[in-house]
Amino acid sequence: MQSHASISAVSELQLSVRGPVFTPADPGFATEVAAFNLSTQHQPHLAFGALDAEDVSAAVKWAAERGIPVAVQSTGHGATNAIEGGLLISTRRMLELSIDPLEKTARVGAGVRWKAVVDEAAAFGLMGLCGSTTDVGVVGYTLGGGLPIMGRKYGFASDHVIAFELVTADGTQHRVTQDENPELFFLLRGGKGNLGIVTAMEFHLFPSQDIFAGGIYFDGDHAATVLQQFSEWVGTLPTEASASLAFLRLPDMDIIPEPLRGKFVVHLRYAYQGDAATATQLLEPMRRSAPFMMDGTGPLDSTRFDTIHMDPDQPVPARECGFLLDRLDGPAREAILRHFGPGVESPVLMAELRLLGGALAAGDGQDTVGGRDAAFSFFMAGMAVPPLAELLPKVYDAVRQDLRDASNSGTFVNLHGHFVDAEDRERAWGPAIRERLRKAKVELDPQNMFSFGHVVGLPVIDQTVLLEDVVTSGADAALGN
């Protein structure tokens, strides 16, 4: 695929859309393309801030006519691999949000973050199935399956989508539901951004009452004892309870609570919906497993879900890696402790075991979410700054090798982390799902317009042939190769 876009062509884009168009020479370009992950520096040839679905459609049509690849970004939390070349469409201005308290549903535009949904729904005693941080975008999270805090009770976020509104590679707008387009509906639920740009989404909400949740911090010296107890305890939990265990090497920074600052700790994350007395009783074996430094568990309003995991709320430079485990047996625990236990010097700030199962394992067979048969998600993150940035890939490879006997072959696309090659980028889906995605890709995007991120089916297009013959003078500027 080869094409050229001159100054006049870029001007045509500006005239066909309502949102702002940026070149690298324009003020605001860096902000428009910035990702939450500061280690990922996008370098598109052009950026566009869409205001609505019509804007997205017009921009995609413009790009399709010129053979220019298109990337999309909302909040940038999922930006593990940099975008180079092409047109980056930012959907962060698409902030439509409505709650139907009678039907217990929500409708969101592509730029809406979970925080807005959580706050709005709480007024009606409802909640959406958000994950460990409400700062992420609802649409991108859900397209990757969406692993919620309350996932063991309700399943993946994508299990509860009612409809998508999608712009395909020719700029056509579609409404996609189970009845109107069942195959595309199947592929969008967990298929990430393979087949188009989702501009809006509708989904079910759930009662937000009777949440008991929070975190317990143990001194890292007790890591072996706590991990042993955790491996036994999770088998006793009902589906109403979700849990994870993280090994944290916390920096000595003001944003960290004083007792934890600069410490190696083990952080139990817990959430239960139901009777508070039962929630407390279920938690007791972990409370008794070792002396704890802080206990932040108790009744929790759904608007305070972020306090459970305490994920970063400011952009950070990170490199991440995730995969799935089928079991947490003795050898697996030993491998984890070898890499993340007491006395280990590791560049990994967080290594987390998240319990799966329950409703996460069920589904309806009508989506592309992988890993439903896995027992745990295992996820690692470190600061991608020198010299740690060079060490992290080697550490991740070593951990995966040491845990290979306990590992599931799959991965969650949202928690996959940086992909290293074409095979790795599509590892989130098994062979049967990959084949269906490839077939749909040929039909809906034969030029591979959407060639960034976790894409299957077609070769990545040549990025060296895009926008050229330009000047750099504000709104009239286009980009020189």
Image: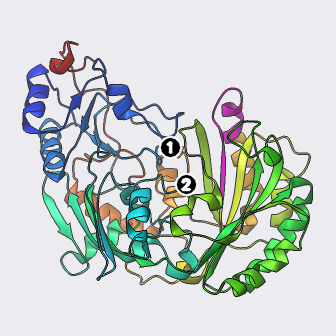
Would residue 147 be visible to someone looking at this image?
no
Q: Quadrant of residue 179?
A: bottom left
> Going by the image, does 245 lie left or right of 130?
right
Image coordinates of residue 125 in percent, x first then y, are 43, 77
C-alpha gap between disc 1 and disc 2: 9 Å
Q: Amino acid at mark 1?
A: Thr
Q: Quadrant of residue 272?
A: bottom right
**Are the residues flagged by discs 1 and 2 in contact, CB closer than 8 Å?**
yes
- Earlier-in-chain disc, 1 versus 2: 1
Q: Residues within 10 Å of mark 1 (few under 14, many from 20)?
A: many
Q: Residues within 10 Å of mark 2 (few under 14, many from 20)?
A: many
Q: Who is closer to the viewer here, 437 or 177?
A: 177
Secondary structure beneath label 2: loop
- At a point 26% along the width and 40% down the height, the residue shown is 69
Per the image, the residue denoted by label 1 is 80
Q: Is residue 278 magenta?
A: no
State which region is magenta: 379-393
- The quadrant of the image that shows the N terminus is top left
Q: Who is closer to the viewer here, 429 or 165?
A: 165
Q: Quadrant of residue 198?
A: bottom left
Q: Amino acid at mark 2?
A: His
Per the image, the residue denoted by label 2 is 416
Marker disc for residue 306: none
